[in-house]
Image: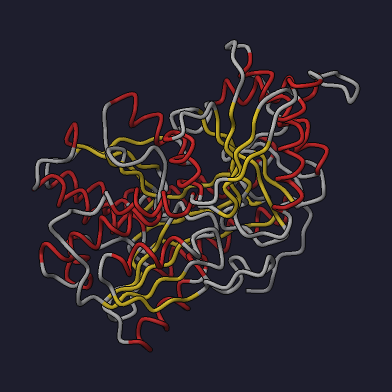
């Protein structure tokens, strides 16, 4: 496949108005997208959605221009969560969908990611084709003229369509009547859709993070700030709380006591429930090596297979499709219910968990007792550039040393982020103080290896 210069694990990502997230790049990506897809021999229609970042206007206009310049039509849905764009793309029988978002990143970042006609993220091969064409395009490359130039259309009812679609994932014989729910929209793409979905199903909604201004997305709110969700639940006396990220494809929860529940606990509850209902296909789930070891032990006890994929929802999805699973997800709260949608969807994930609460009559604080997660610490070490682990011998030695100390009492997992300039260090074990000290030592060694002065801990 070769080294990719633009695409990471979740599209093209970076600081807005700096390479590679400039208008020029967006224009050429739109042109390259059409070139790749037009090889299939027809005029295209392409859906474009975005989150609430101020830079979305700039990139949306540039992408649209590139696509129209190559003779294809654009359908603009405005602020729309990533799964909403995937759904609209598929339901409209469009040829591709584009999402302009940097997910959980700060407002000054942005990103561009692509979906195929069925609402699945493009695989590595197609992204590599787009990238190769991108670097081969010249500013003078001519597109069609006259009536063959593409048009841009706006879909005004896109949010309403998506609201109806998500509600279909909730059992028709159930309602959310009597439940008080804190919904934190992260001032992101779900600020319209999420409160409508939960209130229309009967819940009393306490709304947080639903006043985007272009720069407050993920700013002290949403899934990146679980303490705020916890505080809102306790202050309002809610039965449950949920916090979405900026582009709405992941969700975390708080029980009625303000205790945060992450992805592995969510997977445990839903997998056991789906198994009991005969809904868990292939009697297994797909997750990543970032998951908690307690999840594997729980599923082994209940006869549920656990299959590991590379970190990133696209790799989880590929494994699910290949091996016939309908449930997969990550510790971050990115959960995929493949019978309902082809990507992670924070609203649908929340509805699945809420349906278990309604069916069983149990509060989340009781449901979560099915699993006792091992303590984990995660350090995001900011690095100026990327080196392979072979180029970081002191770090590798430190990891090997502590791995030998932990043996079967825990584990260490180190990898680069696919969306930010971080080297992530995950340490897991039964003793929190021990794993925290190990994580700090590895973090310090990484900073030394990159020539940085470690923070005083």
What percent of the width, then of the height, locates residue 328?
32, 42
In depth, the one of 358 and 92 nearer the eye is 92
Instruction: Classify residue 129 as left or right of residue 226.
Output: right
Q: Position of residue 88 (x, y in %)?
A: 46, 40
Position of residue 70 in the picture relative to residue 236 (left or right): right
Residue visible at 66% across and 53% down in the picture: 446
Q: Is residue 41 left or right of residue 316?
A: right
The residue sitting at the bottom extreme is 235
Q: Residue at x 59, y 32 (%)?
A: 46
Residue depicted at 26% across the width and 33% down the height: 325
Estimate the x, y position of residue 289 in percent, counting from the top left.
40, 43
Residue at left 72%, top 50%? 449
User: Eyeballing the image, is 23 above or below 348?
Assistant: above
Q: Point out the image quarter for the N terminus.
A: top right
Q: Is residue 261 left or right of residue 367?
A: right
Which corner quadrant of the image does residue 184 belong to? bottom left
Q: Is residue 153 above or below residue 17?
A: above
Is residue 97 shown above or below 415? above
Q: Position of residue 167 (x, y in %)?
A: 30, 54
Number of numbered labels in the structure image: 0
Q: Quadrant of residue 198?
A: bottom left
Farthest right residue?
Answer: 140
Q: Quadrant of the C terminus?
A: bottom right
Colour scheme used in the picture? secondary structure
């Amino acid at each position: 496949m070769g080294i990719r210069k633009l695409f990471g694990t979740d599209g093209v990502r970076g600081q807005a108005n700096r390479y590679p997230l400039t208008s020029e790049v967006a224009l050429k990506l739109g042109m390259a997208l059409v070139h790749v897809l037009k090889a299939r021999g027809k005029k295209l229609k392409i859906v474009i959605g975005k989150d609430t970042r101020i830079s979305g206007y700039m990139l949306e206009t540039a992408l649209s221009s590139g696509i129209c310049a190559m003779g294809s039509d654009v359908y603009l849905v405005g602020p729309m969560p990533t799964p909403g764009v995937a759904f609209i793309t598929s339901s409209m029988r469009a040829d591709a969908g584009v999402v302009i978002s940097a997910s959980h990143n700060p407002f000054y970042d942005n990103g561009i990611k692509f979906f195929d006609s069925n609402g699945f993220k493009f695989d590595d091969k197609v992204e590599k084709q787009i990238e190769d064409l991108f670097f081969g395009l010249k500013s003078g490359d001519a597109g069609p003229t006259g009536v063959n130039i593409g048009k841009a259309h706006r879909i005004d009812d896109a949010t309403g369509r998506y609201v109806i679609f998500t509600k279909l994932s909730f059992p028709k014989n159930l309602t959310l009547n009597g439940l008080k729910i804190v919904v934190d929209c992260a001032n992101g793409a779900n600020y319209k859709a999420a409160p409508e979905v939960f209130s229309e199903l009967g819940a009393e909604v306490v709304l947080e993070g639903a006043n985007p201004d272009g720069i407050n997305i993920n700013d002290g709110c949403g899934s990146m700030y679980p303490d705020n969700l916890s505080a809102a639940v306790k202050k309002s006396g809610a039965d449950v709380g949920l916090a979405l990220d900026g582009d709405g494809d992941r969700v975390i929860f708080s029980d009625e006591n303000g205790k945060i529940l992450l992805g592995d606990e969510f997977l445990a509850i839903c997998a056991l429930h789906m198994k009991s209902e005969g809904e868990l296909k292939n009697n297994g789930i797909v997750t990543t090596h970032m998951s908690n070891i307690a999840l594997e032990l729980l599923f082994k006890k209940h006869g549920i297979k656990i299959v590991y994929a590379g970190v990133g929802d696209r790799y989880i999805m590929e494994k699910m499709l290949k091996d016939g699973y309908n449930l997969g997800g990550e510790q971050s709260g990115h959960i995929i219910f493949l019978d309902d949608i082809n990507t992670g969807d924070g609203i649908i994930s929340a509805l699945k968990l809420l349906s278990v609460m309604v069916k069983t009559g149990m509060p989340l604080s009781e449901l979560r007792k099915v699993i006792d997660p091992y303590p984990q610490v995660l350090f995001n070490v900011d690095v100026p550039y990327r080196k392979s682990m072979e180029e970081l011998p002191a770090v590798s030695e430190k990891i090997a040393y502590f791995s030998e100390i932990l043996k079967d009492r825990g584990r260490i997992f180190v990898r680069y982020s696919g969306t930010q300039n971080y080297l992530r260090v995950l340490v897991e074990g039964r003793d929190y103080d021990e794993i925290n000290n190990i994580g700090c030592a590895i973090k310090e060694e990484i900073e030394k290896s990159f020539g940085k002065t470690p923070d005083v801990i």
